[in-house]
């Protein structure tokens, strides 16, 4: 395990289980002394996390995970570090994105029902999900419903299936992206505009878990560089070890920062542990030092 983790989520992300204070306690128990809270399109937990971190002797970097559109249609996640999180834009962003997500959830339910000829009780899901992201509960019920047992597309996401951990996340990335009949266009900020927004707020822009979006397509990675990214989250639980080294090497060759992040959420991604990235990280302390030096320039 490592002593730092630059990608984790709190309950402010809707799909995170723990409060910022609880995250600090988990970090303390696991021996971490540097963390970044990077909630989805939200920085409302930063002050709470920083106060708890100060009491525990843990450095907290204010961060965010932007949901963006790359190339006009591909959902792509972008991490921003060291941002002035009290800027009006970041204070208003969560409510704006939540409205987009509410509309998109309804459209996805309609597309799922039409494509698979199934019934989803959308209102019941919304009621039962409460403040959490309803996508997780909806997928859980959809895959487990005996009425859907004949749908082979769901097999990999059912309990014990090859894509069952975590099934809702994998199903979304596998089946709901641009080009799929289940795709729903959401008017998220463009990737380039989000990079600029991060820079204007004094932060560093880092491409999150790139294999999930770009695989090893260097033309897309080059476009991200052209859009102004400062680094790549090379070490991620979404990567096989060979991908970790591929992206670390790519970052070095192009003069980019390398970061490491678990994407810890808690119960919705149960196999992911804070401070672990699925593989050993060569030169971890050098990566940490270079990142902090860039952040403090």
Image (cartoon, helix red, strand yellow):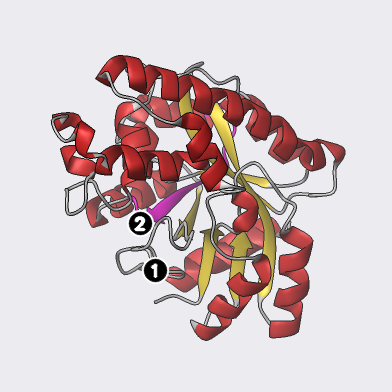
Find residue 28 and report its horizontal and vertical position in percent. Answer: 57, 82
Quadrant in the rendering for residue 45 = bottom right
Q: Is residue 278 above or below residue 188?
A: below
Name the image quarter holding residue 9.
Answer: bottom right
Residue positioned 81% across, 42% down in the render: 91
Q: In the image, residue 143 lies at what x, y percent?
A: 27, 40
Q: Is residue 215 above or below residue 60?
A: above
Residue nearest the observer in this picture, 204 or 272: 272
State which region is magenta: 226-238
Would residue 181 be visible to someone looking at this image?
no
**Can you tell which mark lies on residue 276?**
1
Q: Residue at x 62, y 59 (%)?
A: 37
Element assignment for label 2: loop
Name the residue that disc number 2 marks.
Answer: 237
Disc 2 to disc 1, C-alpha distance:
8 Å
> Is residue 95 visible in this depiction of the protein?
yes
The disc label shown at residue 36, or none:
none
Could you tell me which residue is drawn at 51 percent across and 24 percent down? 106
């Amino acid at each position: 395990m490592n002593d730092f983790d630059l990608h984790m989520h709190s309950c402010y992300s809707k799909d995170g289980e723990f409060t910022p204070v609880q995250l600090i306690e988990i970090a303390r128990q696991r021996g971490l002394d540097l963390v970044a809270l990077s909630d989805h399109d939200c920085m409302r937990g930063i002050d709470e996390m920083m106060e708890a971190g100060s009491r525990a002797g843990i450095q907290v970097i204010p961060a965010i995970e932007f949901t963006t559109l790359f190339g006009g249609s591909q959902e792509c996640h972008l991490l921003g570090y060291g941002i002035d999180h009290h800027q009006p834009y970041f204070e208003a962003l969560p409510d704006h994105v939540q409205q987009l997500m509410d509309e998109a959830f309804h459209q996805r339910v309609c597309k799922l029902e039409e494509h698979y000829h199934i019934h989803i009780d959308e209102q019941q899901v919304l009621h039962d999900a409460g403040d959490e992201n309803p996508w997780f509960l909806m997928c859980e019920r959809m895959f487990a419903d005996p009425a859907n047992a004949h749908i082979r597309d769901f097999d990999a996401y059912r309990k014990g299936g090859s894509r069952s951990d975590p099934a809702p996340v994998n199903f979304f990335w596998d089946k709901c992206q641009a080009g799929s009949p289940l795709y729903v266009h959401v008017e998220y900020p463009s990737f380039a505009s989000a990079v600029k927004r991060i820079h204007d707020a004094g932060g560093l822009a880092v491409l999150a878990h790139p294999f999930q979006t770009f695989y090893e397509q260097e033309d897309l990675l080059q476009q991200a560089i052209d859009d102004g990214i400062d680094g790549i989250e090379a070490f991620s639980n979404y990567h096989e070890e060979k991908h970790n080294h591929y992206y670390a090497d790519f970052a070095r060759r192009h003069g980019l920062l390398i970061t490491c992040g678990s994407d810890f959420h808690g119960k919705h991604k149960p196999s992911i542990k804070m401070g672990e990235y699925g593989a050993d990280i060569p030169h971890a302390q050098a990566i940490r030092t270079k990142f902090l030096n860039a952040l403090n320039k």
